[in-house]
Amino acid sequence: MNTFTIGGVHPEPNKLTADKKIETLGLPKQAVFPLSQHIGAPAVPCVQKGDTVRVGTRIAEPGGFMSASIHSSVSGKVAKIDTVVDASGLRKPAIFIDVEGDEWEPSIDRTDTLLLQNNLSREEIIEKIKNSGVVGMGGACFPTHVKLSPPKDCMIDTLIINAVECEPYLTADHRLMLEHPDEIIVGIKLILKVLGIDHAVIGVETNKQDAIELMNSKLSMVSGIEVMPLKMKYPQGGEKQLIEAVTGRQVPPPPALPANVGCVVQNVGTVYAIYEAVMKNKPLIERIVTVTGKSVKNPCNLKVRMGTPVSQLLEYAGGMPEDTGKLISGGPMMGRPLLDETALVVKGTSGILMIPESEAARREERNCIRCAKCVQACPMGLEPYLLATASESGDWECAEENWIMSCIECGCCQSTCPSRRPLLDWVRLAKNRVGGMIRARNAKN
């Protein structure tokens, strides 16, 4: 069974919502759209207070080459352009829209009719993706139109669709494959056309056997697209780990990219968003979010409009359990803790997880015992104990010299540490500082 070769762990899957069909969440009373929902420069508002918008109206334009548009997911009036506290606890610029009805832009095709073909050129497809604000839906939020425009000296031969969803608890991608397989296949064909290649592999872990069988049946008469079952192993869905599992190729350290080994990787949710953008003229205004936890009354998979407060999702799921110790955006391995229920659903929100206090409480940290379990678990071949120690002492040069920018923040190191050291927290801090140093050096040059 295909998998990656270095490191990895085997957390409990806890796929509590795997059999829960996607349900549609109602509209919020007010939708709030942070301008930084993607990697790169924040978007720039193109509306002002008092403007009337529809569902699908562009409200912010890309702030640079590495940026993405933002569209309203509701209809109503722009209440203000102000700041809002994001998932990290920092105040960021945002657009506030008071909801009035549900009027859509007339150019958006809202029917369920499956569209199979179009006569658009490669450039026209990329332009539609760009104008629709599509970004990576797996969590990284990399602007998709940039990712689909690899350097000309890179010979791309393989498109890999990331349908692994190895993060515990999350099932949004799983349900998407079960409920929209035909749209995903059309989306894959669009990407193949953009890249000018004819080979795509859908990587799926074996705990999603129903999705594997369904996609195989749909692809039985389709050439050039195959499904590859993968061993259950975290972080199988990491871009570099997935490339190795599917092709056997290893991506060199930064600044090397997947394109340097002939691959482009797209999350299955992104593929579906591409289908909607190109075939239905629908911007990225909603996404599937898994709302889950062991004590949650009604764990579910919800189709949610961007800008909806998390409190509305929790209410739909039966409210936050009394024993909740931590509220997380994403999964338990790579997710980010939320300050409270006022957090917002944005393009990168894959799940809302409520962890019981008994599991969330941090136990007393002890001294490192030099067991090297974190080294054995690291899928990037790094030395997490060394990077964490460098971070604690503020030795950013040491952290950079030891390849901290190669860290994918998967959390394997912290989950295996018998001394309960917050390795990932320290590494994230150092990675942020080193990244700032690198940007400052590049700006001088």
Image (tube, grey):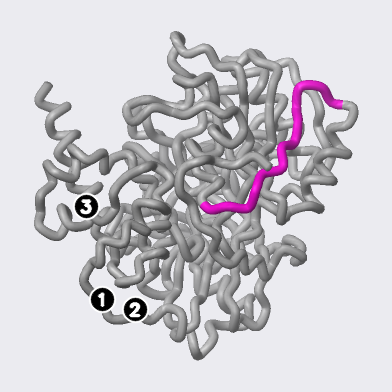
Above or below, comparing residue 101 to residue 299 in the picture: above
- Picture disc at residue 362: 2
The kind of secondary structure element at disc 3 is helix
In magenta stretch: residue 172: no
What residue appears at the point 75 percent right and 21 percent down from the top-left corner? 118
The kind of secondary structure element at disc 2 is loop
Q: Which residue is mark 3?
A: 386
What residue appears at the point 51 percent right and 62 percent down from the top-left corner? 331
User: Are dots 1 and 2 in contact, CB under 8 Å?
Assistant: yes
The kind of secondary structure element at disc 1 is loop
**In the image shown, does 383 or 303 lie closer to the viewer?**
383
The quarter of the picture where residue 84 lies is bottom left
Give the distance between the C-alpha atoms of the residues marked 3 and 2, in whole angstroms: 22 Å
> How many residues crowd mark 1 within 10 Å: few (<14), some (14–19), many (20+)?
few
Q: Earlier in the sequence, mark 1 or mark 3?
A: 1
Q: Which residues are magenta?
A: 222-234
Which of pointers 1 and 2 indicates the residue nearer the eye?
1
Image quarter of the N terminus? top right
Q: Is residue 311 left or right of residue 374?
A: right
**Residue type for callout 3:** Leu
The quarter of the picture where residue 416 lies is bottom left
